[in-house]
Amino acid sequence: MSNRPTPRAVLRTAVTPRWLGFAGLALIFIIGAVVLGRWQWERTQDIIQAEQAAQSAPRPVEEVSEPDGTLANELIGQPVFAEGNYEATGQVMVLHRSFNEQPGVWVVTPLRLTDGSLIAVLRGWLPEVSAPGAIAPDARVVVAGVVQPDEGFYLEAKPAPGTVVAISSVELRKLWGPKTRPGYVTLATQQPTLTPAPTPVPPTVVTDNVAFPIQNFFYAIQWLIFAAFAIVVYGRWLWRDAQEIGAEDDQIPTTVTPS
């Protein structure tokens, strides 16, 4: 006698009132688990989109770069805006910076914010130190850009006054005073506009990724596992009951009709 139930025995078992009830309950559970799993997956996507939108929304630079502090890694690449007045006397030129394969300099000007602190603004690129556009506007401005971390190379270099080889708030603090905020802003737009002006340069560091909401993702997978488990349990117990019916069928004597 084989322990494997016949398809007929499985079908006979499945259409009994008891197993039809089990099938209904299992179907309701599976549908619910799939719906919840899909909801958790959509929730995962919503969280990612919300965090990306929050990260891409401009914030006041005062919230991102704090005086006497450090620039948090997760805030590098954060769009920011700031309002204040440029202090042209503190402007420095960053040497040996190319743009479109053309040699030149970066123009970095301190912006005095409303609280009295300073933030370095990379206003853009010029082909040479004395090129038109080097002079910063003396009017109050609102700038928008992307916050960038301090550059950490060539700090031992001693260039001529008014020039630097890297943008470091530690070194700029020696020139501008202790209220200099860490990092710098790569200028994207400025109001009011100034003509001529340095050519804007793209940010050197961009971090637009957000942490993946792993918890919600695992919740979505968990509900799908529950649905699969319900199918396996239902099939396993149906199989076992069908084995008993198949065994009973095997025990029924077969009537032989005399020839």
Image (cartoon, rainbow, N blue to C red):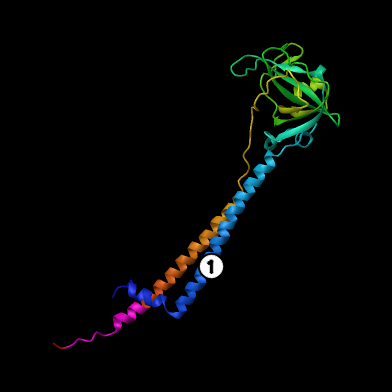
Determine whether 228 is above or below 129 in the image.
below
Q: Position of residue 82 (x, y in %)?
A: 78, 31
Task: Name the quarter where the N terminus is drawn.
Answer: bottom left
Determine whether 161 is above or below 74 in the image.
above
- Residue density around tag 1, few if under 14, some if 14–19, many if 20 or more, within 10 Å: some
Magenta residues? Answer: 245-257
Outermost residue to the bottom: 258
Circle 1 residue = 29
Magenta stretch holds residue 26: no
* Visible residue check, residue 27: yes
Residue at x 63% of width, y 46% of height: 49
Magenta stretch holds residue 255: yes
Residue closer to the observer: 71 or 28: 28
Q: Position of residue 110 (x, y in %)?
A: 79, 23
Outermost residue to the left: 259
Q: Quadrant of residue 68?
A: top right
Looking at the rendered structure, the kind of residue marked 1 is Phe
Residue at x 76% of width, y 14% of height: 162
Assign a secondary structure to mark 1: helix
Q: Position of residue 120 (x, y in %)?
A: 76, 25
Q: Position of residue 64 (x, y in %)?
A: 75, 36
Task: Name the quarter where the C terminus is drawn.
Answer: bottom left
Q: Quadrant of residue 116?
A: top right
Direction from residue 228 to residue 200 in the image, left or right: right
